[in-house]
Amino acid sequence: MPFRSGTVSYSRFGVSGSLPDDANDAAFALMAKHVVKQRSLSEEGSVSGWCTGRHVFDADFGWEHCGFSGALLGAMRIDRAKVPSEIRRAYVAMAEDERRTKADDEAAGVLSRAARRDAKADAERRCKEEIADGRHRRVTMTPVLLDLVHSRVLAPITGDAAFKELHGLVEATFGARLARRAAGSVAAEILGARGMASDLEDAVPDAFTAPPAEAVARAGEAGARTTGRPEVPWALAAGDPHDFLGNVFLLWLWWQVESREGMVETPSVPVAIVIDKLLELDCPWGVGGRVSLRGDRPSRSLEAAKALQSGKWPRRMGIVLAAHGQEYECTLHGDRFSVSGLRLQPPSEDVTTPRLELEERLDRIATFDAVLVALYEHFLRERFGKEWPGRRQQIADWISSRMAARAAG
């Protein structure tokens, strides 16, 4: 169960409106009003509500299980009801058989249109009764951490259906609305706080290599000339064209690892970085397809060098961060700015109770997230600073030199 135990995965969501000021009895009472009850569903569909996150039936909201300094920890339970098609057909057939034995012409066994309609209605009524009794349900639980201090929500949600459920549940419970926070919107928050919102509006994707020949040929076939800059189709598809900054951030981290031994001096804390286990790259020009590399130090492989030279950018990267005396291992999705498989160090020796262990875990998750944001903010300072043209050229030269070094080797 992420947050409470095991590895941690989360996407981030901003809040419009107010969450509770503190994890107090009033907040717990609001959550208790929005739980999934036995007969919450009477037909096919879904219903969502809160639980503590210990298990789907636990609605014992209180400080012991859900309250932490400046945070509420719970989970969204979703019940989805759907009668299997074979069972529905069987109920219709059984209702028709019951009427057929009562038909005047039993030899023919032919039911009238009205009898078939009534049989279908009986079957539908039986399905609804069984749904209301709790049958034909699939129950899932998604951990949710409500950061009351920074007015944000962390949850392992990427799909639209689950986000819609969480959005509706938070709005119904607290009167607040959620919005996804991917790389572009996180950058907007950081730059907006510095009075640089207009700089973000003018930002366009960077070209670290020449356009692939396929992109030039495709533009020629369309009667146009390539602009020399990638379009980054996945960012356009997500609805925020500035999500490309998350991919450039990963590329910048990669350059830091290989050109500066992975040490980044952020204003708040020095961070050591290693790339390990996973590296996925995609073509921002929309022509080259995706490359997925796994294993020890995949960023040092010949395949990685070829992918960079062909113009590909990292989409997901396995990283190890060391900061504040702690080590964190995870996979970072650049454009989504989401984290998966975050591994925390074992509990400290002085942690003697489950409650203290959970408090320490949440503190370490918060510390990791602060380090991640600090790295991203440090990158944005460079990306929107006067030195960026020079840094972009350094990264471009590094890409060329990596391929040359591999070829010479």
Image (tube, helix red, strand yellow):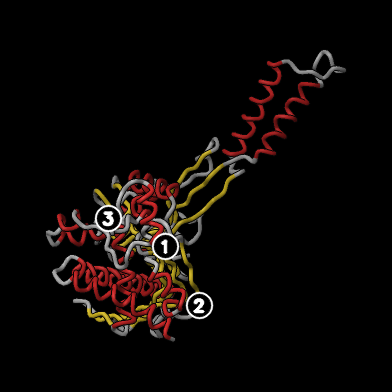
Q: Secondary structure at mark 3?
A: loop
Which residue is tagged 3?
227
Q: Is residue 51 visible?
A: yes
Q: Which residue is located at x 35 percent, y 51 percent?
A: 219
61 relative position to 256: left or right: right
Task: Give the spatial CA distance, label 1 vs label 3.
Answer: 19 Å
Q: Position of residue 167 (x, y in %)?
A: 36, 47
Q: Residues within 10 Å of mark 3 (few under 14, many from 20)?
A: few
Mark with earlier residue (1, 2)? 1
Q: Position of residue 338 (x, y in %)?
A: 37, 62
Q: Which residue is mark 2?
A: 295
Q: Amino acid at mark 2?
A: Gly
Of 284 and 6, which appears nearest the observer?
284
Q: Which residue is labeled 1 in the image?
A: 282
Type of the residue with mark 3:
Thr
Disc number at residue 86? none
Cα–Cα span, label 1 and label 2:
18 Å
Residue 23 visible in rendering? no
Dot 1 alpha-carbon crowd within 10 angstroms: few under 14, some 14 to 19, many 20 or more:
many
Q: Amino acid at mark 1?
A: Asp
Left or right: 99 as drawn, with respect to 69: right
Instruction: From the top left corner, tell me how far across and down residue 133 is, in percent.
Output: 59, 40
